[in-house]
Image: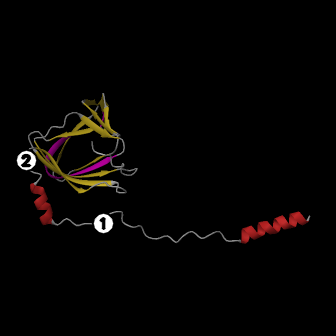
Amino acid sequence: MARVIAAVGLLLLVRATPAPAAPPRKPAVAPVPYFVKTAASLAELEKTLAGQGAHGADLVKAVGPMAVEVVWKHEEENQQNGVESHDGRDHVFFVTDGKAVFTLGGEAIEPKEVSPGEWRAPRSKGSQVVEVKKGDLVFIPHGTVHSRTTKGSRFTMLQLSFWPGGAPAPTAKP
């Protein structure tokens, strides 16, 4: 009986002892510094994007804990070969000037993984062809087959890429 009383007393003592308090929550700390790009600095940057082909300028690079990348792209007379898709990256394109023709959706024919989670294929089936122009917004979730062409036109867009599971670790360049 004494053992039962001692066990109950010990149990009551353990239950009466408050659990250690969790450290107080604090606001999140920004993973990278903020910045502001002035209209003048963007106008200077825009000069580097001119000309035939595809040109881009990173405005926000996905680095470390950053799971977003912002690129300003200009394309002129550019033809993407084949189609692509990404296992873990979503895109949002906002067209700021010109027009382009996108191939969206469907299934990639004979896809090849060119780097981890990055797929390319010579063509697709069941895709839709959509023309976009200044002011249009395109959302391409990961796993969606896509490509674009600017043959016969000029095209400028703000490209936002998101990694829903977090940005991939940087890979060493050969």
Vertically, is 141 above or below 114? below
Amino acid type, mark 2: Gly
**122 left or right, relative to 162:** left
First to last magenta residue range: 89-106
Q: Residue at x 7, y 47 (%)?
A: 51
Q: Residue furthest right?
A: 1
The C terminus, quarter of image: top left
| Picture colour scheme | secondary structure
Residue indicated by mark 2: 51
105 part of magenta stretch: yes
- Residue 76 is at least partly visible in this image: yes
Relative to the observer, which residue lies in front, 150 or 60?
Answer: 60
Residue 57: x %, y % from top left: 18, 53
As helix, strand or loop, the secondary structure at mark 1 comes to loop
Residue 101: x %, y % from top left: 17, 41
Label 2 or label 1, whichever comes before in sequence order: 1
Q: Residue at x 34, y 57 (%)?
A: 66
Q: Residue at x 77, y 69 (%)?
A: 12
Relative to the observer, which residue lies in front, 110 or 100?
Answer: 110
Residue 42: x %, y % from top left: 15, 61
Vertically, is 98 above or below 31? above
Please identify the dominant SS of the magenta region.
Answer: strand
Relative to the observer, which residue lies in front, 18 or 98?
Answer: 18
Residue 104: x %, y % from top left: 26, 39
Amino acid type, mark 1: Pro
What label does residue 120 carry, if any?
Answer: none
Residue indicated by mark 1: 33
Q: Distance from label 2 to label 1 (Cα)?
A: 32 Å
